[in-house]
């Protein structure tokens, strides 16, 4: 292939059309279209690096379940059959959600002795999907996805339920009937720890799904109606929706579930008749079930979460003992990100009571545009549900959830997106005290974030608010003055410094128990006791991969740490990468932050400026002060992965990762009204800073991003000549295709046409004069980033005589999964950088904004 030609290619394993390649021979076209490419060895090594195990802490906080995470799956795995129905992606062979990454091994780690405990009886070729500890810690349940054999690749697979006996250190399968995990993981421990609530594939159900739309003869057209219902409704642009009655029938087949309780010896008791359960949750007493089941009529414009549903309480035989609500089809919400559906929502069991329901109800019709002093009411209703529900609290904004401790103590949070206001209240569920405000802050004000209240699993398996035990001088413990623990990121002008605080709910006084200190980055993962003395943490530095430690705060500072794991550096060849957190100002005075990476062995005086890739993602703020806050930490590990821009360090490029691109709308003004000038000013500031430092050449800088970052890339190339090239992955470029809002934009297109048009790089495709690489997953199901977005922008640039390349990755969604896809992505990015940035000659002209 001539180095001057970059044809648009749909990378595939079968016959595909390649566009814009008139200079190539038919044979060359066929070869290009039918083969994945691998990048240089230095980049491929990053793709194939070993990943650290994941962990799951036991209820008693003394054991870790260690799960080996595999390398990337092959395209053969990712290309397995997949159904796209009502917002779901279903593996029809296994009656499960489509997924392609599974745990390959399972073992235990004793925290006290630091010894590994190997398990016997695990299934061969383990594909662990989900895992959960029994509340009493005597057992550990997990699902194994038994795939079709190599000899019978078309055969059906199954999701199997397995249990580990902790004392015997052995695993065994306990259910002979496969699970259905289309919704959820398919199992949950009952409070007694002796049985599990499971979702089975119904025994009476045919194993043959209904005919597909390809072979089904239509009986008529597919019709939809729009009727006035007293208000406007915004519908998010979604993929994978039902298209016709055949789709609905197939959806019915794969979502039908038989609820059951299975004991550890395999004895199974069916619960009522099969139904299409969105959720199944046992009460803390273990005597009742809260069920949510979807029913017809379905919709062609919303996902199944918005279908009509019955919310009911059943006994363990399946008999409905109380109907909580029957919710109608919800085809859209009122305008605004604070909009919610009317009626009962967010129904759950109260964790510290035998069988009490809690939910919220909007008092403003779910419409944030309506003036209402009370937006949400939170109610509580106890079994046997003969009394009226009792009001727990009135909220001026939207209910966000509750943490339960005991009869006189719980915490409830509320949030209002428009102002980013967060409030947390202490309440007394028994009504013994009025609500008390514990915290009030802005979600975008990282410096003043008080942290998250910590929880732990109780004896019934429910997460409860962790109340601190206080230590006395004699070394014993007693109940503190209603003190809780908070853990947070600890954002500051010096970067993130994670912390753990002890907060006295009575006096509101805080005591800082732990905070990360330079030159390391240490984050508290879990509290290992109720006094806040022993912490499970991860600890890392720019050259040391994160590993797990126990920190005992009762010991002298130099003796507090005990290392639990020894995960090696995943890319030792890049251990010498240089990282610095840099700060600079935008022309309007807003402080900006970025992370600068330089190749191993780089010396600015000796090596001079390098070609650079900037990789960013804009963010909206309601104040300049919040936009100016420092993000991340200079002490985090230099994790060189395949997904971000850092991989190109292996090829000698400099990288500026996550340079701040804040879009600020102060004093009630809409941020996007000035999106373009703010975006351009932020890009100019970043370029000026790296050029000032001497690490980058103004004429050899590319801009890139994924999703909203790709949208940003298109806009910067359409409205400036600041960059020599762009790399845009899985973006949206025509905002009229997302007419009911996008990202933080709440206004529909018809109320902000000027903004939508100005922010759409597709409208300015004739101004894109610098080369743009467009990469997109063919099966992208992210709201708004339909594959057609990249296809149409490419066609526009091509038709207008610009330079672009389109790469469509088969079987890939918004995030790419297959090893072949990731390798090819890096191949394309490296080739693009080498062609248009690394060896670019000085422009000799203006690089100012257009």
Image: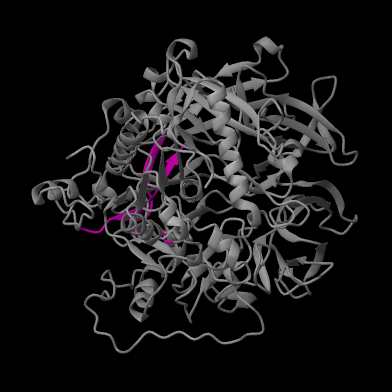
Nearest the viewer among 707 and 250 is 707
Extent of the magenta region: 155-182
- Measuring from the top left, give residue 260's x and y in whole percent: 46, 63
Count how many numbered circles sit on residues in the image: 0
Left or right: 151 in relation to 544: left
- Measuring from the top left, give residue 5's x and y in whole percent: 23, 43
Residue drawn at 75 percent across, 51 percent down:
666
- Measuring from the top left, give residue 243's x and y in whole percent: 38, 76
Query: Quick one: which residue is furthest to the bottom in this view?
Result: 220
**Is the residue 322 above or below the residue 607 in the image?**
below
Residue 114 visible in the picture: no
Left or right: 131 in relation to 44: right
**Is the residue 798 above or below the residue 837 in the image?**
below
Residue drawn at 49 percent across, 86 percent down:
225
Does the magenta portion include 667? no
Nearest the viewer among 317 and 726 is 726
Residue drawn at 62 percent across, 16 percent down:
519
Nearest the viewer among 152 and 753 is 753
Residue 6 visible in the picture: yes
Left or right: 234 in relation to 447: left
- Measuring from the top left, give residue 688's x and y in whole percent: 57, 30
**Is the residue 524 above or below the residue 556 in the image?**
below
Does the magenta portion include 174? yes
């Amino acid at each position: 292939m001539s180095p001057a030609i970059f044809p648009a290619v749909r990378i595939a394993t079968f016959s595909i059309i390649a566009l814009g390649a008139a200079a190539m021979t038919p044979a060359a076209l066929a070869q290009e279209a039918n083969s994945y490419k691998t990048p240089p060895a230095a980049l491929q090594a990053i793709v194939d690096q070993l990943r650290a195990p994941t962990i799951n802490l036991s209820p008693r906080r003394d054991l870790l379940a260690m799960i080996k995470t595999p390398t990337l799956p092959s395209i053969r795995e990712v290309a397995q059959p997949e159904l796209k129905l009502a917002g779901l992606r279903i593996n029809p062979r296994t009656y499960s959600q489509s997924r392609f990454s599974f745990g390959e091994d399972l073992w235990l780690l004793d925290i006290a002795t630091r010894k590994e405990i190997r398990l016997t009886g695990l299934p061969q070729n383990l594909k662990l999907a989900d895992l959960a500890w029994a509340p009493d810690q005597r057992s550990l349940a997990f699902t194994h996805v038994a795939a079709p054999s190599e000899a019978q690749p078309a055969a059906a697979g199954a999701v199997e339920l397995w249990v580990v006996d902790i004392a015997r250190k052995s695993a065994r399968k306990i259910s002979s009937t496969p699970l259905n995990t289309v919704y959820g993981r398919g199992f949950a421990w009952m409070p007694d720890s002796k049985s599990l609530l499971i979702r089975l594939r119904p025994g009476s159900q045919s194993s043959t799904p209904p005919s597909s739309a390809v072979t089904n003869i239509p009986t008529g057209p597919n019709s939809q109606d729009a009727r006035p219902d007293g208000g406007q409704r915004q519908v998010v642009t979604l993929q994978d929706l039902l298209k016709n009655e055949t789709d609905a029938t197939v959806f019915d087949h794969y979502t039908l579930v038989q609820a059951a309780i299975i004991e550890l010896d395999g004895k199974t008791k069916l619960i009522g008749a099969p139904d299409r359960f969105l959720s199944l949750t046992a009460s803390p007493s273990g005597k009742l079930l809260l069920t949510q089941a979807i029913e017809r009529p379905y919709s062609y414009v919303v996902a199944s979460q918005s279908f009509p549903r019955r919310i009911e309480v059943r006994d363990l035989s399946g008999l409905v003992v109380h109907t909580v609500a029957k919710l109608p089809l919800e085809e859209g919400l009122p305008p605004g990100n604070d909009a919610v559906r009317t009626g009962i929502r967010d129904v759950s069991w109260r964790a510290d009571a035998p069988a009490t329901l809690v939910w919220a109800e909007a008092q403003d019709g779910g419409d944030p545009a309506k003036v209402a002093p009370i937006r949400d009411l939170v109610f509580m209703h106890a079994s046997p549900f003969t009394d009226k529900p009792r009001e727990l609290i009135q909220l001026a904004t939207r209910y966000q959830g509750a943490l339960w401790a005991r009869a006189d103590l719980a915490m409830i949070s509320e949030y209002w997106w428009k102002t980013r206001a967060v409030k947390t209240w202490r309440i007394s569920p028994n009504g013994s005290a009025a609500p008390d405000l514990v915290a009030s802050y802005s979600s975008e004000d990282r410096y003043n974030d008080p942290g998250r209240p910590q929880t732990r699993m109780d004896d019934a398996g429910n997460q409860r608010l962790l109340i601190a035990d206080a230590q006395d001088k004699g070394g014993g413990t007693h109940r503190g003055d209603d003190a809780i623990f908070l853990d947070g990121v600890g954002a500051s002008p010096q970067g993130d410094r994670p912390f753990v605080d002890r907060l006295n709910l009575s006096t509101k006084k805080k005591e800082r128990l732990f905070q990360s200190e330079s030159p390391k980055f240490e984050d508290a993962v879990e509290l290992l006791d109720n006094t806040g003395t022993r912490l499970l943490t991860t600890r890392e530095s720019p050259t040391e991969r994160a590993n797990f430690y126990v920190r005992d705060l009762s010991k002298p500072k130099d003796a507090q740490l005990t290392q639990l794991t020894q995960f090696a550096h995943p890319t030792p060849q890049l251990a010498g990468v240089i990282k610095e957190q840099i700060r600079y100002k935008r022309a309007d005075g807003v402080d900006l932050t970025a992370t600068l990476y330089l190749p191993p062995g780089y010396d600015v005086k000796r090596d001079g400026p390098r070609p650079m890739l900037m990789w960013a993602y804009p963010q909206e703020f309601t104040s300049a002060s919040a936009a100016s806050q420092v993000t991340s930490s200079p002490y985090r590990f230099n994790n060189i992965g395949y997904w971000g821009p850092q991989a190109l360090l292996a090829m000698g490029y400099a990288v500026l990762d996550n340079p701040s691109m804040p879009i600020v709308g102060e004093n009630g003004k809409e941020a996007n009204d000035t999106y373009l000038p703010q975006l351009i000013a932020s890009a100019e500031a970043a370029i000026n800073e790296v050029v000032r430092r001497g690490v980058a050449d103004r004429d050899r800088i590319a801009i890139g991003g994924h999703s909203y970052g790709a949208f940003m890339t298109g806009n910067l190339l359409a409205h400036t000549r600041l960059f020599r090239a762009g790399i845009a992955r899985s973006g949206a470029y025509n905002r009229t295709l997302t007419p009911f809002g996008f990202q933080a934009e709440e206004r529909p297109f018809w109320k902000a046409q000027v903004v939508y048009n100005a922010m759409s790089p597709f409208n300015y495709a004739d101004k894109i004069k610098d080369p743009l690489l467009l990469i997109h997953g063919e099966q992208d199901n992210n709201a708004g980033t339909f594959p057609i977005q990249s296809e149409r922008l490419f066609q526009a640039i091509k038709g207008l005589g610009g330079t672009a390349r389109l790469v469509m990755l088969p079987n890939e969604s918004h995030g790419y999964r297959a090893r072949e896809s990731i390798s090819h992505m890096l191949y394309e990015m490296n080739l693009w950088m080498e062609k248009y940035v690394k060896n670019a000659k000085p422009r000799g002209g203006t690089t100012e904004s257009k």
